[in-house]
Amino acid sequence: MKKKIILIISLTATLFLSGCWDVSEPQRMYYILGVGIDFKDDQYEIFMQIIDFATVAKSEQPNQTSTQAEIGRAKGKTMEEAFFKLYRSIDQKVFWGHMTHLILSEEAMKSEHAVPIIDSFLRHRETRYQIWAYSTQDSIEEILLITPIINKSLTASKLSNPLNSGAQESFVEPINLRKLIVGLNEPGHEVSIPLVTVNKKWQTTDQSSVETALTGVGVLSKDGFKGFIKDDAARGMQWMLGEKSRGEVTFKLEGRENDYLTVDLEKLSLDVKPIVKNNHVKFEIAITFNAIVNGFKGKVTSDEIREGIVKQIKKDIKATYEEALKMDIDIFRLSEYLYRNNVKTWKTLEVDGKIPLTGESISKLDIHVNKVSPGRKTFDETIEE
């Protein structure tokens, strides 16, 4: 009898359990992967990229006949108004937790709304600090509609995961929302946001193909947008990254007509020393590389290679630094190096977090090539004429 009473009580108690009735089923939700923000005619224009996880759940290679993503587009006096206009045309609940990247147009960067836009995404309870930030001068809609080469999943694109392609060549440093906010609050109060462009250099068996490329940076400060540094003018940035980086340099061999050499470089170390004298500061920069030579014509010595590398790296760094100075940009964050090393002097010199910089502020640029590898046993040609 006692056992029957306990059983009845237990069964009765289960009636009051709520279970998981308020949880949305995964297949009944839309997942946002990327968002683009433009600002025109005093209105926000937003682009919402929704992906179908059914195409990537079992394989990195989605179904060739399926649609990987759809782009929603709306305008509003506020960003939130534009998003709610899109919600009205959506059939299922939208989940923001898988959002991987945010793209800001040039006009959105130029407006005073750029920092509030970023702040809005940080305040949303479903978004993460790991979202990658990009800037662009091209059509946001076109960028979000581009699928990776060989129709790979959008979750494997360089915009969703820039660290993959960055391992091959770190031309610009990717930045997430966390680093972006830290950069705006640290001395200098400037951040370099990768510039994404549409690249039309690819071809399939039956038609032209397009891909995205990172070709420079847009520089944002707490007071507004400062401008773009791109293409050859941005090449010096990769050598001044605080972390290890990899890239290539192409240079002409000294004294040889039309003889060019391309060398793979791995940056091993970067040391920036502020030198304070008579309340003035200059900076000494030392960078160490390893080099790999993949192919060349004729005979070449390791000394010739080192000389060419040093000359070209110095040229790249100076070109980027001078281009940034024209826009009053501390592109190498030299102000922060002084702040970390000698805060007393920094407090004396700083204006709004930055110290005044000139073309002579970098007093010494020492480039050292630690090791030159020919990729084989000698620096002689494999095929002799």
Image (spheres, helix red, strand yellow):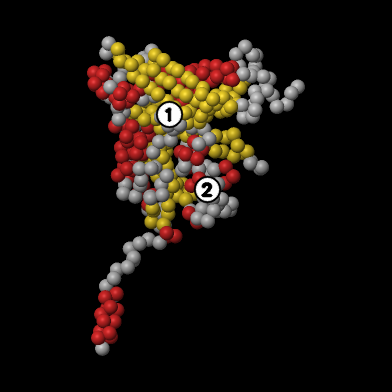
Label drawn at residue 153: 2
At 52% across and 48% down in the image, what residue appears?
153
User: For the residue carrying disc 2, how many other residues have a C-alpha within 10 Å: few (<14), some (14-19), or many (20+)?
Assistant: many
Quarter containing the N terminus: bottom left
User: Label 1 belongs to which residue?
Assistant: 241
Q: Position of residue 211 (x, y in %)?
A: 54, 38
> Foreground mark, 2 or 1?
1
Q: Is residue 5 above or below residue 194?
A: below
23 on left or right of 202: left
Residue 43 in view here: no
Q: Amino acid at mark 2?
A: Ser
At 40% across and 36% down in the image, what residue appears?
175
Q: Position of residue 90 (x, y in %)?
A: 41, 54
Q: Amino acid at mark 1?
A: Leu
Q: Quadrant of residue 283?
A: top left
At 35% across and 62% down in the image, what residue appears?
23
Q: Secondary structure at mark 1?
A: loop
